[in-house]
Image (cartoon, rainbow, N blue to C red):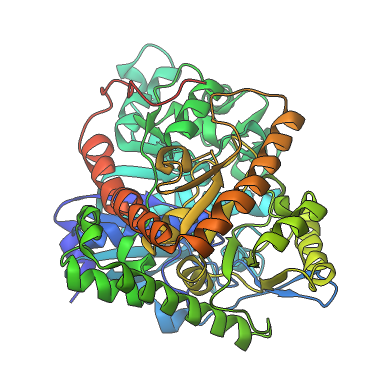
Amino acid sequence: MDILNSFRKEQTIAYFSMEIALTNDIPSYSGGLGVLAGDTVRAAADISAPFLAVTLISRKGYFRQEITSDGWQKEYPLTWEVEKFVEPLSPRVQVVMEGRTVSVGAWAYYWKSMTGGIIPVIFLDTNLPENTADDRQITDCLYGGDRRYRLKQEIILGIGGTRMLQALGLNVRKYHINEGHAALLTLELLQQNKKRLEEVWSEDQMWDTEAVKNFCVFTTHTPVEAGHDKFSYDLVKQVLNEPIPFLFLQKLAGNEDLNMTRLALNLSGYINGVAKRHTEVSRNMFPGYTIHDITNGVHSFTWTSNPFRDLFDQYIPGWAHQPELLTRVDIIPDEEIWDAHQAGKKHLLAYVRDTGGGDMDEDTLTIGFARRMTAYKRPHFLFTDTERLKRVRRKGDFQIIYAGKAHPQDEEGKRIIQTIYQYCQSLKNEIKIVFLEDYNLEIAKKMVSGVDVWLNTPQRPMEASGTSGMKAAHNGVLNFSILDGWWIEGCLEGITGWSIGPTPTEKADPAEQSREEIDDLYNKLEYIILPTYYQQIDWWIKMMKSSIGKIASYFNTHRMMEHYVTEAYFHQAALPPTKGTMLIV
Ligand SMILES: *Cc1c(COP(=O)(O)O)cnc(C)c1O
């Protein structure tokens, strides 16, 4: 039976994302953005939403990470057997780039929920015999290559993807642009909704921007100007020619460069940031646009460890499809919460041992840090003052587990990994520190359910949302983080976890702020976290329960999807911007 057939009968939401993390066997993701996309698909399947996703096949994945003995990251292709995991689709569509026609094919993966819901994920692929050798590789490497390569990928995703959905006979209600990478789909929609010259007063008016806006939902994820995806118009002209008249394109996408965020902002009827704070930052960065906030979530069932799944099944039946029920966590006896946690910890420590990290003690406070290794995330912040760190250690034992990949072109990120490696060595007589290679979905799951404290130390306001701390909370792991992104909304000091440093409304010069943050980090570790763990286990377990009851019940993709459905997908853009958000910067 053709699963897509049932999708042809109604209007669907088409979610476009450069990366999607579906399973560990399909490495078409790099990090948080892809995991969010995957969790979105999972939540859509649970509620049988008329929803599908479009992405690139990424035959060589992002990369496999190995770390040399001197701490330097090496990247290897993560080639996967496409045919084993996805089903071929017959249509071919064409896009023109650099004056040649490139043919685009597609594969489908059907994500199946335990509720019976199915969500198709369409993987675009240019590896077809009719294409030139170069063109066959356009969809190979996620975030690889130079600007030209990236632009070609984004043309395939945005323009090729839109044409593919039409070739498949699908009827799209909304195009959800998940981050700027897919924004070129707006140009295709402009072409398709073009008015005839006789109907309008001027050539510009042939382009029905209002019609396109009605079709588009845009979620921005980047809180700093430098992070936005841009292409020089020289390059755009060489590769894409002139999809719409150049002057008009500049009006929509920026004067100097083609800014994918601007393009999406100008052609989307509903725009949102991914946490309240990030939305404020985006409003300041892009005055004049109505930007809503829908805080990210994680897929509860996916990110809950087996021991906690069993426990929740027993005491809170139905939690997986109604994670708001997790507010009832207090009915679970303390010992059972602790046992489930220790089971997750043993599982992680066994993995550490099996991968050569040596023995770690299951009764020692264990701190986890895993995410993209890049400067703004400050992964080595904990080592700012190693003498102080050693003094803290003398008050109580703790051990640390790290993981994360640096983008292949991010030299600074790689140096940070090397720095952490050096601390593993130089501190090894005082503090046990391990770095797990090749961070992926499976390692993430082990870590967020196997450590005691989940640490996050980003440079504010660069963490748009962050989601790994939400995963930790589902497993009773306590967050200890800078007040940025989602944690501003999730943190109840001493109840759901602990903050690091000043509150988000306090302004200080950056050096002063860092000092306050590092001071707070060491102080809380020494005077609050270690004593609570070793001497007040009852309070610790109470906090674990608060973390599940107050964080997991809300910061999940079921709640997030509900917001997208009611605000973005099935309502028109006329909604006023959300007022009464918690902070004004
Ligand atoms: C959740 C997740 C991320 C995102 O982590 P953040 O701390 O939110 O940046 C990145 N990579 C993997 C594999 C994940 O599972």
Residue positioned most to the top: 201
**Is residue 391 found left or right of 190 in the rendered image?**
right
Residue 85, placed above or below residue 45: below
Residue 121: quarter of image: bottom left
411 sits to left or right of 261: right
Image point 66% across, 63% down: which residue? 405
Q: Position of residue 385 (x, y in %)?
A: 79, 50
Q: Which residue is located at x 59 percent, y 58 percent?
A: 371
Classify 406 as above or below 276.
below
Seen as rendered, the residue at the extreme bottom is: 354
**Closer to us: 313 or 200:** 313
Q: Nearer the viewer, residue 390 or 213?
A: 390
Residue 355 sits in quarter? bottom right
**x and y percent of residue 60 in the render?**
60, 72
The reply to whether residue 338 is visible in this rendering is yes
Position of 174 relative to 439 (above/below)? above
Q: Is residue 146 visible?
A: no
Residue drawn at (67%, 35%), measured in percent from left and top? 226
User: Residue 17: percent from the left, percent from the top?
Assistant: 45, 53
Q: Residue at x 55, y 37 (%)?
A: 260
Q: Is residue 394 above or below residue 265?
A: below
Apparent side of residue 358 relative to residue 296 in the rendered image (left or right): right
The quadrant the N terminus occupies is bottom left
Q: State the residue lying farthest toward the front.
A: 535
Pick whichever, 431 or 314, lies toward us. 431
Give coordinates of residue 305: x percent, y percent: 38, 72
Q: How many marks?
A: 0
